Image: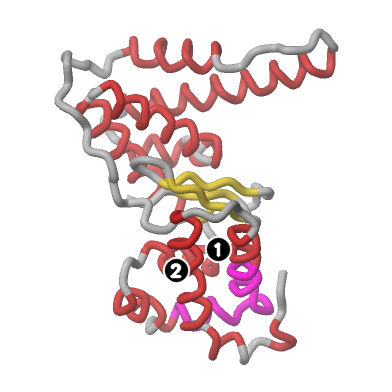
Amino acid sequence: MKLPCVGSRMIAYRISGYTLQHSRCSTCLLTSSRASSIQQQCCPASQSTVLMPKTRMSLTARSTRSVKCSDSSRQTQEHVQQARTTQVKTTEVLADLLQAPNIAATARKNIDSINEEFFMMSSTYLDMAKKEGNIEVCRKLEEVLRVAMEEKQKTLRPEIQLLNNLMAATTVPERERVLSQDTAKQAQIMNNGYFFGLLDRMISDVNRQPDNRRKKDLMDQLQEINKRTSAQRLTVPNHAKH
């Protein structure tokens, strides 16, 4: 399973279980690297968990409490209210997906709400479920995240789909298979090299992050992609950067 990041400015952070992505633009969505690896296994559940309507109330209650007004000014209150409204909407979409008999259809219906906020919040709930040992909730959240990502991926422009697939590849042979496809070759050079603009900015953003093992792993992967696509980059006029 892969988790996305939103926008053409991307910063990746690995957390237990999933990779969260932050961005500075909400024009598109990009999946993370190796987000499929679940690094922490769910502990045996201490109690039975049933995903019923109470799940929606629990999620919404937690979401509402997470936003607090620290300033009495109208501007701050409006900002807090907007954030609360967004969080409540996001948790409602998540609750709908958790209870949906057809997750894919529900995801398509709410595709505009399946964004960075959705994946960040879903990942947070997944982390909470793991810590609480709720195996069934972990399983259901993982399924929802996987299907939501797959449906969102279908709406993306070709360059972003290519970068997604390259980031999802865990070995050099897998990456080579992705690049060998005709659609991959076309995606690299179309729109004045938009693909390379995305790649360059992602490298730049990650490079500015504090040094740690997660950063190193991601940079190694990005540099490998950069190396493997360097020949195609030379065919783009002016080696455009976006």
Instruction: Where is residue 167? Give x, y as percent.
Output: 43, 64
Label 2 sits on what residue type?
Gln
Q: Is 86 in the magenta? A: no
Residue 201 location in percent, x, y? Answer: 65, 64
Position above or below: 182 against 28: below
Q: Earlier in the sequence, mark 1 or mark 2?
A: 1
Q: Which residue is mark 1?
A: 157
Report whether 143 appears left or right of 7: left
Give the residues in magenta. Answer: 183-200
Q: Is residue 155 visible?
A: no
Q: Quadrant of residue 159?
A: bottom right
- For image coordinates 54% across by 19% down, the residue present is 88
What residue is rendered at 54% in x and 23% in y? 89
Secondary structure of the magenta portion, mostly? helix
Name the foreground residue: 137 vs 185: 137
**Of marks 1 and 2, the one in the foreground:** 2
**Cα distance in 3D space between marks 1 and 2:** 22 Å
